[in-house]
Image: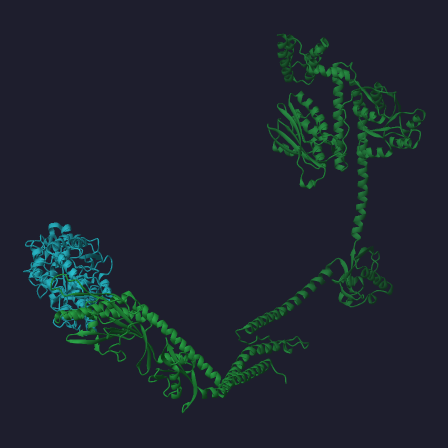
Amino acid sequence: MPETRTLTAWTHEHVSTREFQVLREAAERFNRQQKAYKVELVSSLYRDYERWVRAAAVNGTLPCLFEFDGPFLHELAWSGYLQPIDQLIPARALTDFLPSVLSQGTYQGRLYSLAQYESGLALWGNRRDLARADVRLPTLQRPWSLKEFEQALQELQALPGIEHAIDLGAYSASREFYSYAFGPLLQGFGGDLIDRNTGDSARSALAGAPSVEAMRHFQQWFERGWASASLDRAAALSRGKSALAWGGNWEYGDYRKALGSNLVLLPLPNFGHGIKTGVGSWTWGISSTCQDAAGAGAFLRLLLSREQIARMSDTHSTMPSRRSVIERSRLYGVNGPLRLFIEQLDAGLSVQRPATPAYGTIRDAFAGATAAIIAGGEVEATLREAATRIDAEIARNRGYPNQ
Amino acid sequence: MNLGIKQKMLLALAGVLIFTVGLIALLASYYTQRQNEEAAFADIHKDLKAWQTDLGTSTLQFRRAALALAGDQGVLDQLAGVLIAEIQGSARGAGGEQTGINRTLAYTKTVSLNGLYFMLRTGAFSSITVYSGGQLSHYVSSSEAGMFVRWGKSPAVWLKTPIGPDGSLPLESWPAWAKSQPPPELPRSIPEVRQPEIIMAFPAADAAAIDIAVPIEGVVRNFPTWWAGQVPEHLVSDLAVAGTSPTGTYYTQRAPPTPLAVIVFRKRLDDAVLRDLAGKTGKWPALFSPDGRHRRELTSFPLISAELLRNAQANSRQARPQVEHGTLDTTHGSFYAAVLPWRFEGQPQLILGFALSRDKTVANVGQTVMAILIVSGIILLLSMGIGTYWIGRFTEPILALTAGVNRITGPAHLPGSDGQALAPLEPIQLRAPDEIGALARAFNTMLAELRRSFETLEQRVLTRTAELRQQTLYLRTLLDTLPLWVCLKDTQGRYLAVNEPMAKLCGLISADEMVGKYDTDIFPPERAASVRAEDREALTAKRRMSIEERMPFGPYDEPPWVERFRAPVLDDDGTALGIVHVIRDISGQKTAESARETALAEAVKLARLRSEFLTHMSHELRTPLNAILGYAQVLQRDEQLSSRQARGLAIVQSSGEHLLNLINDTLDLARIDAGRLDLAPSAVKPGTFLQSLADIIRVKAREKSLVFSYEGEGLPEALLIDAKRLRQVLLNLLSNAVKFTDLGEVSLRVRRLPSRPEDNGTDIVRLHFEIRDSGIGMSAEQVARIFQRFEQVADVDRREGGAGLGLAISQQLVQLMGGEIWVESQIGQGSRFSFELALPLATEVPLAMRSEIRAIGYEGRRRSVLVVDDVPANVAVLTEMLTPLGFEVYHADDGQEALAEIETRKADLIIMDIVMPRLDGLAATGQIRSAPAVAGVPIIAVSASAAPEEVARSYEAGVNAFLPKPIEYGALLQTIGEQLELKWIYEEARATAAEQAQADVIAPSAAEMDLLYGLALEGNMRSIRLRAEHLSNLDVRYRPFATQLKRMAESYQSKAILSFVETHRQQADANAS
């Protein structure tokens, strides 16, 4: 009888989360179904997951399976840490996945990762406050313009009980949130984090006039008191202190619980170049040094099954990564309260974060610049400095050559 | 030449330095000479051997480290990853998938490089290279890392990256590493190595290296495929260092190269190593390959000759190669050189060499000496310079200080006789941070103090001069003003100071005229000689002398009385400096003295007259009293007296006694005033003494129905007391207490007090006497007056007798005994008198005295008593007293008659009055004592003058006892009994029966008691007395009752009678029932 080989799978979820429970149940199920492999699920617990993965990669101790945030696929694949998985997933199944998920997992034409869920970015609103301020509710077809948006903020700000018209999530300690949530803001004004055509420079995009204008408006929203930088994570929208929140689909559960039927989901404004919104999620990959790729593939297939994706979606309002699951979803299905996110995706309004090994540097530079701008830093100089840092990193890596 | 301190120190310094330098040069020359060729070679040999040993040791260490690191499981796992990726790469096909495999292979190499880089730093290697399948795979050194990767179409591209400035390897961005070529020193392939080997390498012309090649072996096997068409996976496992495990086997389906990989750990021996050696040994090291093709020397020309090298090569084949040495002469000089082949584990590995410059060695001697001399010369000069500077620094303050001191102590600052002002004391200008500076500052402080002192002294001299002048003036004036004649002379008799009166007395115009002159210049020769003699006497005696005389010189008709004083003026050591002569006019004093003497004589005379008067008065008053009281006592003894007679006699006696008390008080007062009241202490039993007093007072108290209590605490057996005076005091106080108390009680309390420190352990007993009553009390104003003479603070009704002298005398007596009477009293609250006496203990216990002798006769023959008295009444009294007792009494009128009487009729006892005409009692006594026939007859002196001096004179005259008049019957009998040693016969039986009867008072009938009660209520004392007499006569058993009743009636105690009758009526009733 062949020996049972142990596959280790790392997840960024803490053991206390419902998501981890779903994954653990899947692993247990996998281990019961066959004897050749045994999956051992390891939580990051309180580790800095990103640093943990990098340290393991350098030392050659990456597990067979591990989670990572979608935008890092290019960096991990470029360094040779991942092996393609397209051979491991049936082609028919792949067609069921959202294009954004497939796009996020593809590097140099090969699929390296797949996610159980996708994400979306929009505006959450308090219907009652919006009505009190007599503000029009925007739609995908007729979103707020910049002027309307700022007008709305001003009127909402004037409402009694409202401390700040909008919660921009600037409390977020996660560097990731800034590029995820405000990268689309730049794009809405015509700017971007990096020149997507060449992928080798941030100067023209991040330090360009559209981005500068976008971030100046962004800064004014804070200066006028419409938004606030706060360490208080308790959502201001839930507490009635704000009338709007710039956030992701994962907030639905909390907001719904707090506002009930007053919760309204609105598209982001059209700042001039159409609605631009964020996308991307945590995804699974197999390390290049994994000697049990076949076993890893088998477990990955289980994770990406409709059933597991539906279970994961049910736990945290996550957006399923497979269409067949979405259509059956109470939240994201047709007429579901979160259907807007699917419509945004389908309308091509979602923009991936830059697909380059330099993404880590881009993210850190933009997060630093955004924090400085919120704190009152001069916008253009701050963005130029961030762009310089990104370009230097790209140059240091010779433009990230590929074999 | 007189050198200063500075020059001396400099000379000493120079001498020491020159000597030291010379000595060093000589020693250096000597020891350098001893450097010879053998020593040089021996030194080289030693260093070569040490180098050889070091090489061997370090090579062994490197190998141990290399094997340990290569065997690390982490390293082997990482290497396994590389091997797997290589196998996978070679197993897969081409195309897109190949790119991923190539990428994985490259990534696994970065992982391996990461581990190797850590080892490199851990083991201090120069580089670590991995050969896979005998081909160069990847390598890392302390400066860079590199690896072969498949890139695009190219099968092998060398990527390299420098080590970051922080020592990090940019492993994640390996695709961005630079494409390059491997370092030339790295062979692309490695010969087959079956077990760890040490290989000497010469990677470059300038470097040798020790390579430790460690072969890695392991197991490669296929991984079972999961589904059909799956590319076979391979597993590489069980990697280990080859040649170290005898069980190493290969399970391969496809035979892998053997071994799978080789890791080469390199330690370079480059110029740095040689320079390090040169630095340590001071010689030129050289390194050769055993074949001699590779050589490394630090010099640009060969130091090891070819011949020496050949010898070494030949020698290196020996198992224990020896050192070969020789000399080499080149254009650069002459050298000693030596080589030693180094063999490691039996194999020749390197040839080691050292060269040492010979010229330098020989030249060293001269150069060393010269160098030492030059350096020493410089040091000498420097030392001299520094020494000069520092000696100057050290000595200049001293010199400056010395100069300053010299300036100050120079003649300009010393007081001279020329009287010129002294030069000012300028401070020393000196700045030095050390003790010299401190000394200079202290000196300057001292100078300032000195300067201040000079100024102060000058000022004080001026002040003192003025003061002296003023004082001289004062003295002059004082002397001139004194009503005395004063002069001061030196020991030679020269006048130093004279006041004006003296000058005038001596007939001179002024005192100034007299000063400076001698006695002989002033007085005639006789007088001058007399004065000088007196002066010499005073100077010799060294004490003050005075003479009272008439002024012996001067312009007087009648010279006044003067007192002349001569006092020597003595120095501290007793040396006579001169003599003071003061004359005082005492004429007035003489006159006053004369008057005072006259007055004193008059006063003495008056005092004597007064005393005589008192004595006379005492005598004159006592004489009739003697008769009165004597007869009263005699008559009272008559049992046939009627009540009236008895009462009359009692009044006579009490009046007589009262008169006697008055006389005594008056006499006492006179004595006190005259200071002639002396105490006569004698041994007394205080208990008995006080009890007898208490008995007296108890009777008085009972008469007033007062409760009397006496309490004596801690009384000693016997004390020395003037019992008479103490009795006088206590009776006075107690009598007063009874007198001024109508209801309640009177108490006498005497207690012994604890000794005091001042008693000093002597036989002193402190007694506290307290007389308390619950009587009428006194106001504060009355209390203030009670001790004044003739003061009676009580109301008129209570002034029973007395002249108001009792308390005054009592106070005087207590004070005489060393105490003080204290009074506490309030109106209506009674009084408390107290005093405290310190009394000496008596060593002899006095005989018990019967308080009252009720003698009726004496045992033995009849005795004759001669009573000598010029007063017939006195004789009669004594006769009446003594005759009933059985004495034969006869008498004489005076002393003369008494002498005549006893010649014819011998008496057994003589009672002698003192004051008598013709021959008084004392003179008669003296004559009796001188007459042998009658000299032994006891004589009792009796005198109305009972003054102590009178008593003393009597005893001096020869009497045996003294009794004061009026003669107390009891005292008389006691004295006679003592003198004649009589045994008295007492009326014991009668007394006993009477006392018994008194104790058993039997009351009469109830009817009689009712009658008595009624009489008492009426206050009819006369009838009560008559009833008492009637009862007494009615039945002898009623006598005690009748006696008490009668006594109370006589003293008009109606209340007491009522109480008495009431008590006994109840008793009578009880008896009747």
Left or right: B121, with B1054 as reference point: left
Residue drawn at point x = 22 percent, y = 79 percent: B181
Identify whether B555 is placed above or below B437: above
Find residue A82 and report its horizontal and vertical position in percent: 17, 65
Residue A58: horizontal and vertical position, in percent? Answer: 24, 67
Q: Observer-nearest residue: A214 or B1043?
A: A214
Quadrant hosting residue B710? top right
B359 vs A22, left or right, is right
* Image quarter (top left, top right, bottom left or bottom right) of the C terminus of chain B: top right
> From where the camera sits, is residue A395 visible?
no
Q: What colour do you see for chain B? A: green
Q: Quadrant of residue B339?
A: bottom left
As displayed, is residue B473 above or below residue B408? above
Q: Position of residue A352 (x, y in %)?
A: 12, 65
Please tell me which residue lies in front, B297 or A351: B297
Would residue B434 be seen by someone viewing this image from the given angle? Answer: yes
- Left/right placement of residue B382 relative to residue A42 reads right
Where residue A252 appears, x then y in whole percent?
A: 13, 54
- Write down which chain is painted cyan: A
